[in-house]
Image: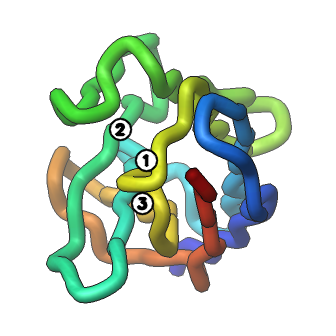
Amino acid sequence: QVRLVESGGGLVQAGGSLRLSCQASGSTIIVVAMGWIRRAPGKEREFVGAIRWSGDTTYYADSVKGRFTISRDNAKNTVYLQMNSLQPEDTGVYYCAASPYRLDNYAYWGQGTQVTVSS
């Protein structure tokens, strides 16, 4: 089991920044990658980005490339999502998720944190 706890959401004006954190605990040894996925009101879940648990490889959705950065602090078992130049369309609930054993296998999810960007 991998437990995930997100924090850092909130309300920000367009053009502003927020940093989300996701702390993992439990059987993190099985984790291959950590991802961020968001759900905007009335829309399907959308992959935002991911980072491998070891190494520095990151992946981003086209919609956030150049604005969002994912990083990791293995000593703290924490993954971060730095969001800059936020726009109203970035509004939604942001979830972190852990992918065990292989990529794109998000089996463990956090509770989500709300991000609201006002225009």
Q: Looking at the image, do the residues carrying marks 3 and 1 touch, with CB atoms under 8 Å apart?
A: yes
Mark 1–mark 2 Cα distance, whole angstroms, equals 5 Å
Along the line of sight, the residue nearer the viewer: 48 or 110: 48
Along the line of sight, the residue nearer the viewer: 20 or 79: 20
Please state which amino acid type lies under the numbered disc 2.
Ala
Along the line of sight, the residue nearer the viewer: 50 or 65: 65
**Disc 2: CA contacts within 10 A as few (<14), some (14-19) or many (>=20):** many
Q: Is residue 39 left or right of residue 78?
A: left
**Disc 1: CA contacts within 10 A as few (<14), some (14-19) or many (>=20):** many
Of labels 3 and 1, earlier in sequence is 1
Q: Is residue 18 visible?
A: yes
Of labels 2 and 3, earlier in sequence is 2
- Residue 85 occupies quadrant: top right
Q: Is residue 95 visible?
A: no
Picture coordinates of residue 61, whole percent (x, y): 21, 35
Q: Is residue 111 left or right of residue 54?
A: right
Disc 3 target residue: 98
* Label placed on residue 50: 2
Q: Is residue 119 left or right of residue 68?
A: right
Along the line of sight, the residue nearer the viewer: 64 or 75: 64
* Label placed on residue 106: none
Picture coordinates of residue 50, whole percent (x, y): 35, 38
Please state which amino acid type lies under the numbered disc 3.
Ala
Q: Residue at x 34, y 73 (%)?
A: 40
Mark 3–mark 1 Cα distance, whole angstroms, equals 5 Å
Of labels 1 and 2, earlier in sequence is 1
Picture coordinates of residue 11, whole percent (x, y): 75, 62
Please state which amino acid type lies under the numbered disc 1.
Met
Q: Looking at the image, do the residues carrying marks 1 and 2 touch, with CB atoms under 8 Å apart?
A: yes
Q: Is residue 20 above or below residue 72?
A: below
Disc 1 target residue: 34
Q: Is residue 44 above or below residue 37?
A: below
